[in-house]
Image: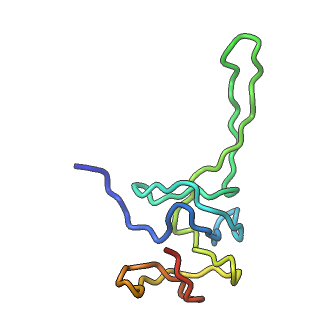
């Protein structure tokens, strides 16, 4: 049996706004999506620091920063034109293809 995969309202490359947590209000692009855990990595959001020990003799250690995943329910798709976050509606375009649309603006995402 394979891993469970959840249908998510956001995809890699989407611009989203964080709606809860310590980074509330921040806007960024989705860099990675984890459907198994329903989490996403957003650029500039939930930035953590990692202390890396030196690997070779004489090399100095480093402090690296990286974005940790946050739950997808804490982000909403964001319209850069109208500067507003909105929920997603599923609709069909002229070719009969199912596409995602922002409810507030009517903007097509796909």
Residue at 50%, 82% in the rendered image: 101
Q: Position of residue 32 (x, y in %)?
A: 53, 54
**In the figure, residue 4 lies in which quadrant?**
bottom left
Q: Position of residue 83 (x, y in %)?
A: 71, 80
Coloured how? rainbow
Q: Residue furthest top?
A: 57
The residue at 63%/75% (across/down) is 78
Going by the image, does 5 lie left or right of 29?
left
Q: Position of residue 7 (x, y in %)?
A: 38, 67
Q: Residue at x 66, y 18 (%)?
A: 55
Provide residue 58's location: percent of width, then percent of height: 77, 12
Q: Residue at x 42, y 58 (%)?
A: 35
Residue 63 occupies quadrant: top right
Residue 6 located left or right of residue 106: left
Front-most of 43 and 74? 43
In the rendered image, the vertical position of residue 28 relative to residue 50, given as above or below: below
User: How many numbered callouts?
Assistant: 0
Q: Nearer the viewer, residue 29 or 63?
A: 29
- Find the residue positioned furthest to the front: 95
Q: Is residue 1 above or below residue 39?
A: above
């Amino acid at each position: 049996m394979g891993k469970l995969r959840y249908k998510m309202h956001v995809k890699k490359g989407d611009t989203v706004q964080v709606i809860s947590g310590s980074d509330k209000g921040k806007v960024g692009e989705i860099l990675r999506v984890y459907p198994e855990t329903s989490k996403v990595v957003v650029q500039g959001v939930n930035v953590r620091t990692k202390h890396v020990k030196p690997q070779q003799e004489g090399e100095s250690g480093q402090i690296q920063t990286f974005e940790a995943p946050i739950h997808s329910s804490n982000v909403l798709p964001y319209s850069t034109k109208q500067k507003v976050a909105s929920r997603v509606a599923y609709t069909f375009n002229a070719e009969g293809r199912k596409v995602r649309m922002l409810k507030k603006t009517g903007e097509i995402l796909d």
